Image (spheres, rainbow, N blue to C red):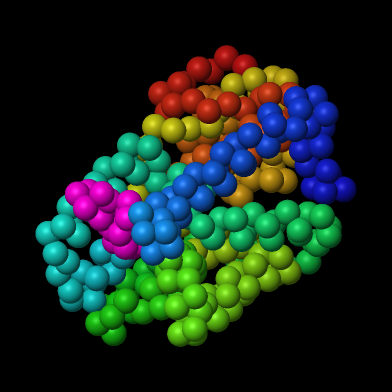
Amino acid sequence: MEAMSAGREAIRSKGWWAAQRWLLLRRASQLLVLSLFLSGPWFGLWIAKGNLASSLTFDLLPLSDPFVLLQSLAAGFMPALSGLLGAALVLVAYNLIGGRVFCAWVCPVNAVTDSAAWLRRRLAIKTGRVPDAATRYWLLGAVFGLAALSGSLVWETVNPVHLMQRSLIQGLAGALAGGMTMTLSVLLLVFLYDLLVASRGWCGHLCPMGAFYGLLGPKGLLRVAASQRAACNDCMDCFAVCPEPQVIRPALKQDGQVSPVILDRDCTACGRCIDVCAKNVFNFTHRFDQRSDS
């Protein structure tokens, strides 16, 4: 019952906007990223050419997904200099900000998995089995292993992140070519898996791309902190909505650490714990905010 009502008390005490602010800003961020790529093929306004795997912004700034680039290297392909430069820029950015910020603020599949989690709470579904958290790292290794053995980017043929974005960019042409059918099938499987089999199963336990970005920026600056943890009334709303609930306890309950800052590399900095907390326990901060007072 607690999971179904997560955030209701925050809406009553803080108002609708304050209880949804970071969720809505994340959706705006995801839509903005998509619109940069869609503006060209849809409206003829070419801001970013390409997709999340590899792009050129304003015909000047190359950006490449380092996850895809490493798969290419494992498969025996040497990317062009612009691809290497683009991957280096992305690596630097996510090392500074935090790798899993990508999962919450950029990845288009996040809206799919968030929807499945919301519906799972609403329907009070408790069944299913969650894989071991290390599974995603085994799958990450398998992705590079398959690329090396096959000489091709095997994972990218089914990667829901790039499938979804490419299908949106291709639009009607992609749908007529059958690409949209493949994309919808993969996204439906992800949605049903999270809804019926494992709570937050895809992003939290399986996605190798999320695992990669978690390893990419474990020392990133952007952090969430339980700065007012003394005010916590154990309503558990933050745990109910967090895509990686295991990251909260050390900071909130001083379980193994004194600092109220969430330091776990798996935190996506989504801000949902800030939204749904009626007691304003959580806030965004930086990694070096190591206050121990609560």
Residue, far top: 293
Residue 172 percent coordinates (x, y) = 49, 75
Residue, far front: 44
Residue 136 percent coordinates (x, y) = 48, 64
Residue 26 percent coordinates (x, y) = 55, 43
At x 63%, y 34%, the residue is: 21
Residue 270 percent coordinates (x, y) = 56, 41
Q: Is residue 79 visible?
A: yes
Q: Nearer the viewer, residue 80 or 247?
A: 80
Asked which quadrant contains residue 148, the reply is: bottom left
At x 58%, y 71%, the residue is: 187
User: Is the residue 194 above or below the residue 153 in the image?
Assistant: above
Magenta stretch: residue 49 in it?
A: yes
Q: Nearer the viewer, residue 240 or 270?
A: 270
Residue, far right: 1
User: Is the residue 277 above or below the residue 150 in the image?
Assistant: above
At x 80%, y 61%, the residue is: 126
Segment colored magenta: 46-66
Locate the C terminus by quadrant. top right
Q: Horizontally, is 80 left or right of 51 in the view?
A: left
Magenta stretch: residue 280 in it?
A: no
Q: Nearer the viewer, residue 122 or 211?
A: 122
